[in-house]
Amino acid sequence: MNVGVVGLGSMGYGIAASLLRAGHSVFGADINPEAIKRLRSEGASEGDASSAASELEALMVVVLNAAQAEEVLFGDRGLVARLSPASVVVLCVTVAPDYARNVARRCGDRGVHFLDAPISGGSVKAAQGKLSVMASGTPEAFAAARPALDAMAENVFEVGDKAGAGSAMKAVNQLLAGTHIAVMAEAITFGMTQGIDPATFLKVIPNCAGTSWMLENRAPHIAAGDYTPHSAVDIWLKDLGIVLDVARLSKFSAPVTAAALQQFVAASGMGLGREDDAAVAKVYARNAGLTLPEKGA
């Protein structure tokens, strides 16, 4: 297939690389020219997703938020107006379900299929082509996107035949993931107040009932003092904000999520917004007067 990938960050680049390995022709696009140059060195087409829009059979949108997705799809140089009928837009961004439904309607008006397909698994699984996709859309949209999905994902969960269901499932996942990171940070720093250093924490807790995937993935960052961003603190201001917006519209109280969000807000306010999301531990450390491990120490 001819596949456009807009957004070549840690997730989008992995998706693009996985598509290349599967033999697809990939047209990348990103505001960072170095990302495009690197992708072309690995075999991507010389054209970009914009110049090749009319030739694309699938357009993967892997940008940061709904505002960026809106600009890519429907802005002054929006791609939907230039896509051929029967092509498919695959929106991998974490957005509110209502926004996904809105995009589906506008794509449909142009005869373009739409798949509401948020992703999970992080940069490592993106690079391996082993993401999990929580997707919803028409059978025709799934059929059009299937070759690309098979290249980028280990699990494709078909959670509904209408847009919005995929984003709703992603909101559920992000509620858990965000609160798990925050409570991991709380637990590892609480342990430090009791004389349990992060290295010992990591030897014990992953083998006990209190563990989680996020704990096992993020706690090593704290123990190593390495906050190179794989997923940044500021991502959670957006994602947990979406969760709480959806909850409010449903008149659902989500107090644990709200508490977790405040810790990420505090971390961002400390200037840590672009650090790895495990840096939320620095909020707890500051408040408790603790010194976290330093990289290379």
Image (cartoon, rainbow, N blue to C red):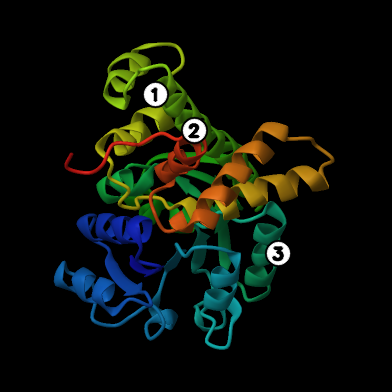
Image location of residue 69, percent across then percent down:
55, 69
How packed mark 3 is, by other alpha carbons closer than 10 Å (few <14, some 14-19, many 20 or more), is: few
Horizontal relation, residue 253 to residue 91: left or right: right
User: Regarding mark 1 in the picture, which secondary structure is present there?
Assistant: helix
Q: Which residue is mark 2?
A: 288
Label 3 vs 2, first from the N-terminus: 3
Label 1 vs 3, first from the N-terminus: 3
Q: Is residue 39 above or below residue 187?
A: below
Nearer mark to the viewer, of 1 and 3 = 1
Quadrant occupied by the N terminus: bottom left
How packed mark 1 is, by other alpha carbons closer than 10 Å (few <14, some 14-19, many 20 or more), is: some
Name the residue type under label 2: Ala
Nearer mark to the viewer, of 3 and 2 = 2
x 57%, y 82%: residue: 81
Image location of residue 19, percent across then percent down:
29, 58
Q: Nearer the viewer, residue 61 or 147?
A: 61
x 71%, y 45%: residue: 244
How packed mark 2 is, by other alpha carbons closer than 10 Å (few <14, some 14-19, many 20 or more), is: few
Across the whole image, how many numbered discs are drawn on residues?
Answer: 3
x 73%, y 35%: residue: 254
Residue 146 seen: yes
Image location of residue 107, percent across then percent down:
62, 70
User: Regarding mark 3 in the picture, which secondary structure is present there?
Assistant: helix
Look at the numbered discs 1 and 2 and tell me whether their residues touch, using CB distance below 8 Å. yes
Name the residue type under label 3: Asn
Name the residue type under label 1: Met
Q: Which mark is residue 102?
A: 3
